[in-house]
Amino acid sequence: MEICFLWTRYKKRLQKELLALQNDPPPGMTLNEKSVQNSITQWIVDMEGAPGTLYEGEKFQLLFKFSSRYPFDSPQVMFTGENIPVHPHVYSNGHICLSILTEDWSPALSVQSVCLSIISMLSSCKEKRRPPDNSFYVRTCNKNPKKTKWWYHDDTC
């Protein structure tokens, strides 16, 4: 009975966040409607670089994957598709080094707040470059960025 209750709460939370993203998306973000037709647990969010930033006019895609422990467990979030932003906290395989996606996650956060954090991260960038350990990381990492033990040492960009 408890598992059924948790599953229902999980689904309701995802549906609520899905509606919020459809009806009031963060600036430059749009839910890719096709991505949620078959499953509510995997979304693609289309993103456009903010005006006046290094990424102005560029188009990206974010992949969100939700486990059955959401919102107590953070979603898996990464850039996907052909255009991965060149950024000091974004690896060429799409993995994002951002603390709210792992150890600083809180159930009070939402898909919208994650999107806003990623927009802010990109918008504050002063130089397009990959993380210094990009080549090694991409060769050796797990496919799931949440399995990485990130070392958050640089909050300047």
Image: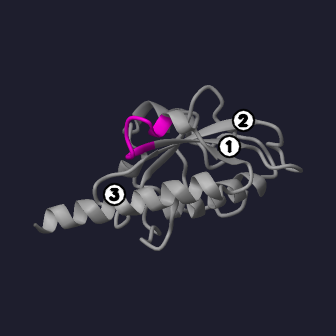
Q: Position of residue 60 (x, y in %)?
A: 66, 37
Is residue 147 among what the camera can see? Answer: yes
Q: Residues within 10 Å of mark 1 (few under 14, many from 20)?
A: many
Q: Whole-Å distance between the Cαs marked 1 and 2?
A: 6 Å
Q: In terms of sequence position, does the residue under pointer 1 or pointer 3 come before the other?
A: 3
Residue 74, image quadrant: bottom left
Q: Position of residue 61 (x, y in %)?
A: 61, 38
Q: Is residue 144 left or right of residue 43?
A: left
Q: Whole-Å distance between the Cαs marked 1 and 3?
A: 25 Å
Q: Nearer the viewer, residue 93 or 29?
A: 29
Q: Position of residue 105 (x, y in %)?
A: 45, 67
Residue at mark 2: 59
Residue at mark 1: 47
37 inside magenta stretch: yes
Colour mapping used in the image: one colour
Residue at mark 3: 11
Q: Cβ–Cβ below 8 Å for labels 1 and 2? A: yes
